[in-house]
Amino acid sequence: MRALLWCCRLLIFLFLLAFAVKNTDPVSIRFFFDSAWQAPLIIVVLAFFAAGMALGVLALCGTVFGLRREISRLIRGQKTDDR
């Protein structure tokens, strides 16, 4: 089972590597006030992917902290009921 998992990881890595090698053409991202950023396409794609992941993690932080607070409240309530 471990060998199958490593084969899948290797396959995904090779696929992403081939994707990166094929997408090295420079692209221009235009911002407001006539500013622009030129970079290879794969860098732009990876930057927006990373930014999306960061926003997703930040969106979940409130839920995670709220659940932690509720768990600690429930544990405290359970300890006081045992006495």
Image (cartoon, rainbow, N blue to C red):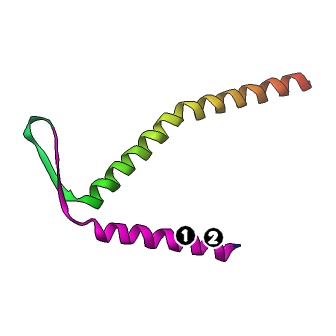
In the figure, 76 relative to 34: above or below? Answer: above
Element at badge 1?
A: helix
The amino acid sitting under disc 1 is: Arg
Among the 4 quarters of the image, the one containing residue 63: top right
Q: Which residues are magenta?
A: 2-31
Report x, y in % for residue 27: 18, 56
Q: Quadrant of the C terminus?
A: top right
In the figure, 33 relative to 25: above or below? Answer: above
The amino acid sitting under disc 2 is: Leu
Distance from disc 2 to disc 1, alpha carbons, whole Å, reads: 6 Å
Query: Tag count in the figure?
Result: 2
Instruction: Name the residue carrying label 2.
Output: 5
Q: Is residue 67 left or right of residue 46?
A: right
Front residue of 80 and 9: 9
Report x, y in % for residue 23: 27, 65
Q: Main secondary structure of the magenta part?
A: helix
Q: Residue at position x 44%, y 73% from top?
A: 14
The answer to the question of whether label 2 and label 1 lie on touching residues, with beta carbons closer than 8 A, is yes
Report x, y in % for residue 31: 16, 40
Among the 4 quarters of the image, the one containing residue 16: bottom left
Among the 4 quarters of the image, the one containing residue 54: top left
Q: Is residue 27 left or right of residue 6?
A: left
Q: Which labelled disc corresponds to residue 50?
A: none
Q: Quadrant of the N terminus?
A: bottom right
Q: Which labelled disc corresponds to residue 9?
A: 1
Report x, y in % for residue 36: 12, 46
> How busy is the neighbourhood of tag 2: few (under 14 within 10 Å), some, or many (20 plus)?
few
Q: Is residue 32 left or right of residue 13?
A: left
